[in-house]
Amino acid sequence: MCQTLLGVTHVTTVCTSYFWFFSVLGYKSLEVANRHVNAYLHVTEIKKWDICAGNAIINFLGGKMTTLSNELLYYSSEDDTTNKKGLLATMEKHELYLEKLKPHMEKHELYLEKLKPHKP
């Protein structure tokens, strides 16, 4: 069974799932809301103003957008303006996608940790 996921930089096929990676955030959210794709995955830091409208539309239509730790995103002026925990947007089966992504995200976090500059 093929699943389509939107993400950050390129189009690729992994096993039997299609991952579509590119950069226009509002468009990605609309693709999820219109059910043209099953999920949108973002794994790097992102400014909340880039995702808030898409989050509102997806939530209004019954979908869900969370961090990759399944935390809701908050847009209060008291909160950080950057989401550093990645995000997943879906219209259904949100927890299933999070569970399937978990082993890959652990590897990704280790990779990102290796890229960080080390202080002497």
Image (cartoon, rainbow, N blue to C red):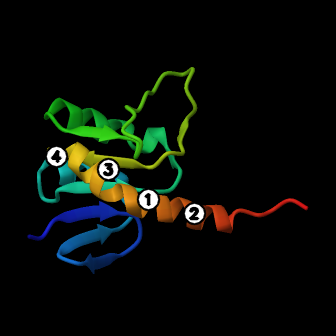
Residue drawn where x is 43% and y is 44% of the image: 50
Mark 3 lies on residue: 26
Mark 4 lies on residue: 93
Q: Residues within 10 Å of mark 2 (few under 14, many from 20)?
A: few
From the viewer's perspective, is residue 117 above or below residue 49? below
From this viewpoint, which residue is outermost toward the left? 1
Which of the two labelled residues, at mark 1 and mark 4, occupies the earlier sequence position? 4
Q: Residues within 10 Å of mark 3 (few under 14, many from 20)?
A: some
Q: Viewer-proximal residue, 75 or 86?
A: 86
Number of numbered markers: 4
Could you tell me the amino acid type at mark 3?
Answer: Gly
Residue 28 shows in the view: no
Q: Is residue 19 left or right of residue 47?
A: left
- Find residue 18 and report its horizontal and vertical position in percent: 21, 72
Q: Viewer-proximal residue, 50 or 80?
A: 80
From the viewer's perspective, is residue 47 above or below residue 71? below
